[in-house]
Amino acid sequence: RLPAPMPRIRSALDKLVSFRQSEPARSPEGRFFPLAANESPYEPAPAVVRAIHEAALGVNRYPDHTCADLISEISARFAVPEDTVAVGCGSVGVTQMLLEAVAEPGTEVLYAWRSFEAYPILTRLSGAARVEVPLKDGVHDLDAMAAAVTDRTRLIFVCNPNNPTGTVLHRSALETFLDRVPADCLVVLDEAYIEYVRDDEAADGLTLLPGRPNVVVLRTFSKAYGLAGLRIGFAVGHPAVADALRKACLPFSVNGLAQAAAIAALREREALRARVENTVAERERVHRTLTGQGWDVTPSSANFLWLGLGERTGDFAGHCASAGVALRSFAGEGVRVSVGSPADNDAFLAAAASFRPKRG
Ligand code: PMP
């Protein structure tokens, strides 16, 4: 018998694996320390929970597709015009909208590597070619990136601070780079972790926007604002770009609970400040302790730390998993461990202290 005819799937999907979250680790006693996804360890502030409850009563209706109230709140909070803001289903949703707006087969999308894993996945889906420029000592090699731009380059991702290395670019270096990028090529400054930066010379993308219509800043409510489970992020850029993003947005993909929670979270400025300060203090404590244990740890401007462990990566990640500590491992390269609650961090530090590499 002939095989039944099957639907044709785009060849761009052949090499894609479906997105997988890290395996939940459990210690023999059933303990679990979630340090794999760079989430906030804090539950939402009471005012945010109240806003979600209120919005829950309206979920029989479609949400406001235009996110008008949230956009006006973002506009006021960040001092940017409303017509420069576009909201999406997580900043990965906005990333996909950006690619929908500018990328297609025959074009190129450029980014540093290693960086955020959504860039290659979503670029493949768009049909554009991926151009990956290796990091230099864990940092974006902006010279090499500028040199890799061709007349087919439509979009450049700059992840700042970079996931997973935690390194941050300085304003002057970024300005020089932006001046070298052709005006018809969009540069996305992905600032998912910007709230954790404590380096005075670091770039804040929003200050780079005036006079640069080809720059877009990407922000998320998933990290410092603690709303990862609600899926909401936004972009700020030239009105023409924001308009294109709105066209590329899946109808109603930003739900009403997320919109209400994001507005409430933006108003909880003191809670945000205190939580971010705690995380930064914990980051520095974990860094110091690891260094004291003899580990080589990259200084981080984000809510995670990078240990370039090379060949020891698999053993180390397995050892941490057996202690219930879930982290992200990149085979043969290293591990990224989120900064969690003090108890989570202590569990990780204890695991790191008791690690003994297997001898091959
Ligand atoms: N950008 C970067 C650099 C990230 O690390 C992440 C999350 N890991 C995101 C964007 C996506 O965040 P979200 O879709 O939850 O807004």
Image (spheres, rainbow, N blue to C red):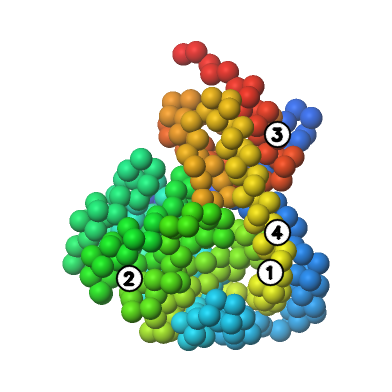
Residue 145 found in image quarter: bottom left
C-alpha span from label 3 to label 2: 42 Å
Q: Which residue is mark 2?
A: 186
Residue at (70%, 34%) from the top-left corner? 347
Q: Which residue is mark 1?
A: 269
Image coords of residue 110 (percent x, y): 31, 58
Q: Is residue 1 left or right of residue 322?
A: left
C-alpha span from label 2 to label 1: 31 Å
Residue at (68%, 51%) from the top-left corner? 278
Q: Earlier in the sequence, mark 3 or mark 4?
A: 4
Q: Residues within 10 Å of mark 1 (few under 14, many from 20)?
A: few
Q: Nearer the viewer, mark 3 or mark 4?
A: 4
Q: Nearer the viewer, mark 3 or mark 1?
A: 1
Q: Earlier in the sequence, mark 2 or mark 4?
A: 2
* 30 vs 74, nearest the viewer: 74
Q: Which residue is mark 4?
A: 274
Residue at (59%, 82%) from the top-left corner? 76
Kind of element beneath mark 3: helix
> Are circles 3 and 4 on residues that touch, CB within 8 Å?
no
Q: Which residue is mark 3?
A: 347
Q: Residues within 10 Å of mark 2 (few under 14, many from 20)?
A: many
C-alpha span from label 1 to label 4: 9 Å
Image coords of residue 212 (percent x, y): 33, 76
